[in-house]
Amino acid sequence: MEKLKLYNTLTRKKEEFTSIKKDFVGLYTCGPTVYNYAHIGNLRTYIFEDILKRILKYNDYKVKHVMNITDVGHLTGDRDMGEDRLEKEAKLKNKSAWDIAEFYTKEFKKNLKDLNILEPDIWCKATDYIKEQIELVQILEEKAYTYKTSDGIYFDTSKFPDYNKLSHQKLESLQEGARVEKNDEKKNPTDFALWKFSPKHEKRQMEWSSPWGIGFPGWHIECSAMSIKNLGEEFDIHCGGIDAVNIHHTNERAQNNCSVFDGESGKEVVKYWIHGEFLNIASGDKMAKSKGNFLTLQSLIDKNINPLAFRLMCLGTHYRKPLTYSETAIQNFNTTLNNIVNGYKSILEKVNSEKEIEDFKKTIKEKEYLISELSEFREAINNDMNMAVAFSYYYDIITSNKVGYSPEERKKIALKMDEVIGLNLKDIKIEKIEIPENVKLLAEKRLQARKEKNWIESDKLRDEINKLGFEIEDTKNNYNLKKK
């Protein structure tokens, strides 16, 4: 059996996956900052993470999945300057930051449902874990990784020699005032806020008491606090978009390793870091809210695009390669989705036809076909999630008449593969149609005419069946009737 291999951003290579605990995987995925709708570039990341989770389950791992909701602390400048995104949006909409967070959290969860993304086992909001975040900052303070400025408590990155191991960036390349905001009180350009003080003479909607004064947590500390709280001091996988590597995940890793292992080289809280690439629009630009060039899932729905067509689009390009979105491409995947649904319905109709089952001779035993047909599918998904190849096997078994397989066998194979592909084939039903006796009689007469090779009579009977509102589909030794 092909062992699961995944590309680890930390080591920059594809590695054979081994879990810390036998048959159990702790999985943490960075969730949304709920100040606006998720755009489809964001949603590409959640789809790849869903596929990963499904593959782990397919390989018989029990998965404990934790996802955060960032509802405080994510500033408009990712290096700890600017306005809090929730507070800013609340002022623009003349609503409370809590109301803004609740609204966009519900919208995000609706997106996940529309895309058939499995929900995490644990949702955790940053505002529900303030105590744990303060405690983690205190641990880092006790271990002498922090210092105080006029606007907050900062992590001193010079005290963690492995700081850039995840990003592989040269620290000297980060010049303040260029890629990093200017802050004269910071000891190093890469230092980041663990706890921010509320501005003087201004009361924030979201602020808390702490040992250092009234304020709010930095963006990065929440993920460290919530992942360790829910998954333990060592866990298997942390996922996110590629844009999180250089700042958010690099800072998170520093907090993790310094709080748990006191920064000891070679010891890691997270064993595998896995990241998905950007989604670009046809012009080649990265889709981003800051650029104003983003599309929501609802905008696709408004164009009569099934959300699952976007899921298929994401499967068509490897998660570690940029994906280009275009109207033509999404329309093509919508057609592909319709082909799959119709193909699977056709299989169900044949499975439900007793005569068809009787007429079809099974040439391969169940265990043999499961091994032969699904082994190539498993090999593809276990090769760092090569979903384009895996999908080709899935599409073929559903839409083409595979020689040597009964409809029942094709159904079983399709459902097994769909555990990973995630189009919810198991929920597809075919409408039971009552066929009038006169139509059945015409169909039987036509079957006899075909056996006698009386094609003129056969065509005449087909026309009569059509006039009565039914279509007849010929099979090898039988027929299927459908309502027009």
Image: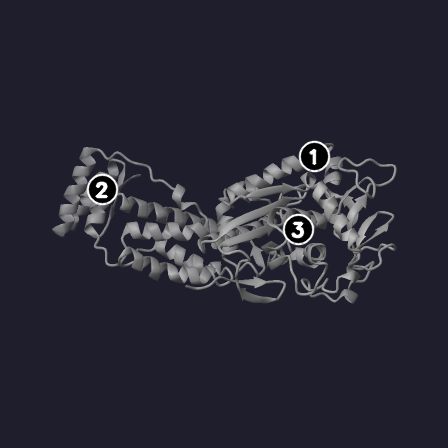
Q: Amino acid at mark 3?
A: Ala
Residue behind mark 2: 463
| Element class at badge 3 | loop
Q: Is residue 371 left or right of residue 246?
A: left
Q: Mark 2 against mark 3, which lies toward the viewer?
A: 3
Answer with mark 1 or mark 2, whichever residue precedes in sequence: 1
Q: Residue at x 31, y 57 (%)?
A: 367
Indicate the amino acid at tag 2.
Asp
| Residue shown at 14% from the left, 51% from the top | 451
Q: On residue 98, which mark appears? A: 1
Real-space Cα separation, disc 2 to disc 3, in angstroms = 56 Å
Dot 2 or dot 3: first in sequence order is: 3
Residue 301: % across, % down = 53, 41
The residue located at (41%, 63%) in the rendering is: 1
Tag nearer the camera, 3 or 1: 1
Left or right: where 90 falls relative to 57: right
